[in-house]
Image: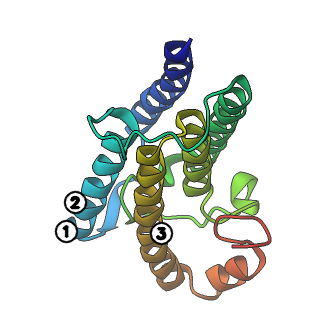
Amino acid sequence: MHSIYDNLVSVLWLGFLLYWMLMAVPVKATERLEPAFSRRLRAAVFLAAIVLLCVRFNSAWLNYRLWPVSRFTFFAGAGITAAGLIFCVWARAHLGRNWSGAVTIKHGHELIVTGPYAIVRHPIYAGLLVSFIGTVMVMGEVRAVLGFLLMTLAHFHKLRLEEQWMRAQFGEKYEAYSSRVAALVPYVL
């Protein structure tokens, strides 16, 4: 039964990654790209987090179970994972050709403030973090929590840089937007 649990969440993530790769092609040309060191550092942190989430280590403390696996934690976690991924897909579709995997300014960059961007300024990051919370619930191990913490740090680094660039690009328009829409958690953060 444990493998059924592992496979469902894995299928959710694999489906999401397939969609993400297919949608990465039709984007606008890049005008400004974040430095290579920043992109590589974040990629290394993401990779470390993914390894923690995907690889079962021969380590008692990394595999230490923080809560028992149950139908409730599995279905709640899988549902939260799916909801977060669906929110990401909605945001990605709404962002359209302005999307980029790195922090960029595109030629003809538009400030998107509708759809999921009316709920939070960074709905893709918010959705991913929610999805990782759901995955942690399903896994219930120390390594999953550590992976989530690494992902959170990487996303906050990217978010801060993106916020600086959006403020520089859109000025008062972005300031007004950021004063009425939270970054990640509606009405909170």
Mark 3 residue crowding within 10 angstroms, few (<14) / some (14–19) / many (20+): some
- The reply, left or right, for residue 143 in relation to residue 6 is left
- Quadrant, the C terminus: bottom right
User: Which is nearer the N-term, disc 3 or disc 2?
Assistant: 2
Residue at 56%, 45% in the rendered image: 92
Mark 1 residue crowding within 10 angstroms, few (<14) / some (14–19) / many (20+): few
Q: Mark 2 belongs to which amino acid?
A: Arg
Dots 1 and 2: beta carbons under 8 Å? yes
Dots 3 and 1: beta carbons under 8 Å? no
In-front residue for pair 185/62:
62
Scheme of image coloration: rainbow
In-front residue for pair 74/102:
74
Cα–Cα span, label 3 and label 2: 15 Å
Query: Which residue sits furthest front?
Result: 60
Q: Mark 1 belongs to which amino acid?
A: Phe
Q: Disc 2 designates what residue?
A: 40
In-front residue for pair 96/63:
63
Cα–Cα span, label 1 and label 2: 5 Å
- Quadrant, the N terminus: top right
Q: Mark 3 belongs to which amino acid?
A: Phe
User: Which is nearer the N-term, disc 3 or disc 1?
Assistant: 1
Secondary element type, mark 2: helix
Horizontal and vertical percent position of residue 119 = 76, 60
Query: Which residue sits furthest bottom?
Result: 172
Residue at 42%, 75% in the rendered image: 161
Horizontal and vertical percent position of residue 65 = 50, 39
Q: Disc 3 designates what residue?
A: 156
Q: Disc 1 designates what residue?
A: 37
In-front residue for pair 131/118:
131
